[in-house]
Image (cartoon, rainbow, N blue to C red):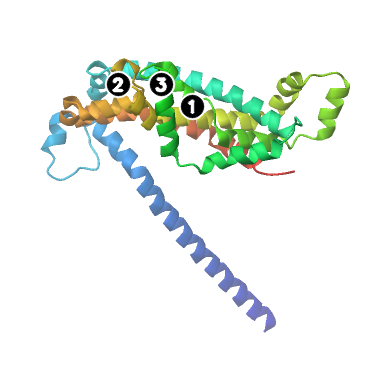
Amino acid sequence: MDNIDFKKLSRGARIRRGISSGVIYFCLAVWAIIVVFPFYWMLLTSVKSLGAYYSETVPQFFTLSPDFKNYVTAFTEVELGRYFLNTIIFTLITTALMLFTAILAAYAFSRLQFKGKNVVFTLFLSLMMIPSELVVITNYVTITNLDLRDTFTGLILPSVTSIFFIYLLKENFEQIPDELYKAAKIDGTSDLKFLFKVVVPICKPTIVTVVILKVIECWNSYVWPRLITYDPSHYIVSNGIQQIRESGFGRENVPAMMAAVVVVSVPLIILFTIFRKKIMEGVSRGGTKR
């Protein structure tokens, strides 16, 4: 009798567990559809001909005759290629400068000893609580006073530091045993050599994560480039797409507009898909003490 009751109890627990898992997966599936649907609609619209798009009285959720001419139109009718080139230049330079300054600052806060280090770092972190709108205003006034508006220098300079990435790298650098640092100092190794020969290779996963996140941030940057640049030759893809939307081309040829948006979005989707595990690994390593 006891065995039968135990089996019933075990069966009931499995049923409840199965129902609970089913509800969770159902909710996740619904949420995934909600998140993915805008991308699907964007892709679907980009392969519809202009006539087919405007002839739809009821939205069609699939098409049997995709038209890829919209992608050609997106590159020939607007300066999408120039926007891509500007974005690549902006992203590479900004990411390189930010990574260099973040690594040096994180190493100084994690290994070097100087008076008031903890106070300085606390004040440094407190800057994260300042609303971004206030920072944009300050940066705008500074760049304007330096006569750097509508230049790549003015576009790049405010983005070469990141408090969050410095904090993330600092936490990661502190996980390296002190014995390793002391042994290197006994051997006469300088701090810079220890940093680039020992610390950087050990913390490579987190550094890769920082690079990926910064690339995504630069690629999606909109407010600052929109504010500081007014010459289309300096636009990056986010501002270029907005310019296309505001122009007659974007309003009249919606499928070509969507094709341009797909072209801009695909690189980031591929980047995140390939490196999503490294991003999660780097973030978790940076926030966990050993």
Residue identified by numbered label 1: 159
**Is the N terminus in the top left, top right, bottom left or bottom right quadrant?**
bottom right
Does label 2 or label 1 sit earlier along the sequence?
A: 1
Q: Estimate the x, y position of residue 70 in percent, counting from the top left.
A: 23, 24
Question: Which mark lies nearer to you, 2 or 3?
Answer: 3
The amino acid type found where label 3 is placed reads Asn
Q: CA distance from mark 1 to mark 3?
A: 18 Å
Q: Residue at x 49, y 66 (%)?
A: 19
Query: Residue lying furthest bottom in this view?
Result: 1
Tell me which label, 2 or 3, sits earlier in the chain: 3
**Extreme residue toward the front, this view:** 145
Tell me if mark 2 has few (under 14), some (14-19) or many (20+) residues whose alpha carbon lies within 10 angstroms of its own: some
Residue occupied by mark 3 = 145
* Quadrant for the C terminus in the image: top right
Do the residues bearing badges 2 and 1 touch, measured as CB atoms within 8 Å? no
Figure check: 220 above or below 4 = above
Q: Is residue 288 above or below residue 69?
A: below
Does the CB distance between marks 2 and 3 fall below 8 Å?
no
Residue beneath the point at 30% across and 19% down:
80
Nearer to us in this view, 199 or 100: 100
Kindly check if marks 1 and 3 are in contact, taking CB atoms under 8 A apart as contact: no
* Residue 279 percent across, percent down from the top left: 56, 36
* Direction from residue 279 to residue 117 in the image, left or right: right
The amino acid pointed to by label 1 is: Ser
Q: Which residue is mark 2?
A: 230
Determine the image quadrant of residue 110: top right
Q: Amino acid at mark 2?
A: Tyr
Q: Is any part of residue 88 visible from this angle? A: no
Specify the farthest residue to the right. Answer: 186
Judge whether residue 108 can be spotted in this image: yes
Q: What is the CA distance from the residue labelled 2 to the residue labelled 1?
A: 19 Å
- Residue 161, position as x, y percentages in the image: 54, 28
